[in-house]
Image (cartoon, grey):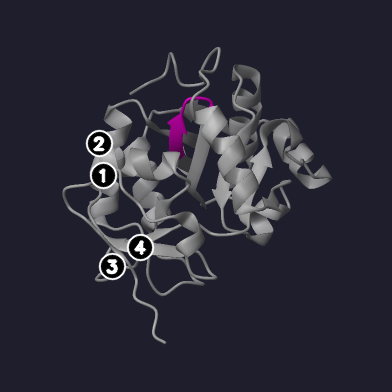
Amino acid sequence: MEYALPWLQEDAPSLFPELNTATSDGLLAAGGDLSSERLIAAYQQGVFPWFNEGDPILWWSPDPRLVIATEAVHISRSLQKTLRQDKFTLTFDQAFTQVMHACAAPRPSEENTWINHDMIAAYTHLHHQGIAHSVECWQNDELVGGLYGIAIGSMFFGESMFSHQTDASKVAFVHLCQQLAECGFPLIDCQVSSPHLISLGAENISRQDFIAKMSLLCHTQPHNTPWENHHG
């Protein structure tokens, strides 16, 4: 029997199918739009958009889910050496759209990017609302690495990262983890497993466990935020 992917209703931006109806690889639904209301509702329910240019909007909720405890970020010896060299300058929310464009640039291992113009516009709008945030890694005033994601309550949802210099994205990620830990954000959603993130201490947990932790954190206000005095 052929599987029929549910299509989201245009007039119900907060309505998503039950997560246990997702396919084995986590595909939950298609359609809808990238309005701020729908995106925020999606993240609060453990769902995120991920689709290629020319495809309909696809919504995912994988099981297992990759997460990292901000206090458990792993810093290898070589990365410790890079950090001690202090060759990068780190900022928050100083070049959000520039970071997204850098994350969207084609990479040698990939034919195309899933971060298209509509995604950049939608997340930049969330940034202006104080919901989407970026970490920038600079070297001699040049943007050489960074990442961006969504903050709701005391939960941070990582989206994408890039690096134009060795270890630049890792330095940005470690900086984010350390700053979030200090401010009362215990967990970062890393979405799907990758060797890069596993090497930094991320681990897979069940979707059920993720939803339980994430739902509580989304409704818990942190005592501070790393970007409070840096919003651009």
Looking at the magenta stretch, what is its main secondary structure? Answer: strand
Circle nearer the N terminus (2, 3): 3
| Residue on which disc 2 sits | 125
Question: Within 10 angstroms of label 1, few (less than 14), some, or many (20 or more) residues?
Answer: some
Badge 1 marks a residue whose secondary structure is: helix
Which residue matches tag 3? 53
**Residue at image x 49%, y 29%?**
218
| Mark 3 or 4, nearer chain start | 4
Measured in 3D between alpha carbons, the distance from the residue under mark 3 to the one under mark 4, in whole angstroms, is 17 Å
**Looking at the picture, which amino acid does disc 1 mark?**
Ala
Front residue of 79/40: it is: 40
- The answer to whether 42 appears left or right of 9 in the picture is right
Residue that label 4 marks? 29
- Please tell me which of labels 4 and 1 falls first in the chain: 4
- Identify the residue under disc 1: 122
Disc on the earlier residue, 3 or 1: 3
Neighbor class of circle 3 (other Cα within 10 Å; few <14, some 14-19, many 20+) is few
User: Could you classify mark 2 by the number of other residues whose Cα lies within 10 Å: few (under 14), some (14-19), or many (20 or more)?
Assistant: some
Residue 122 is left or right of residue 164, and the answer is left
The residue lying furthest to the left in this view is 11
152 within the magenta span: yes
User: Please, what is the three-letter code of the amino acid marked with disc 4?
Assistant: Ala
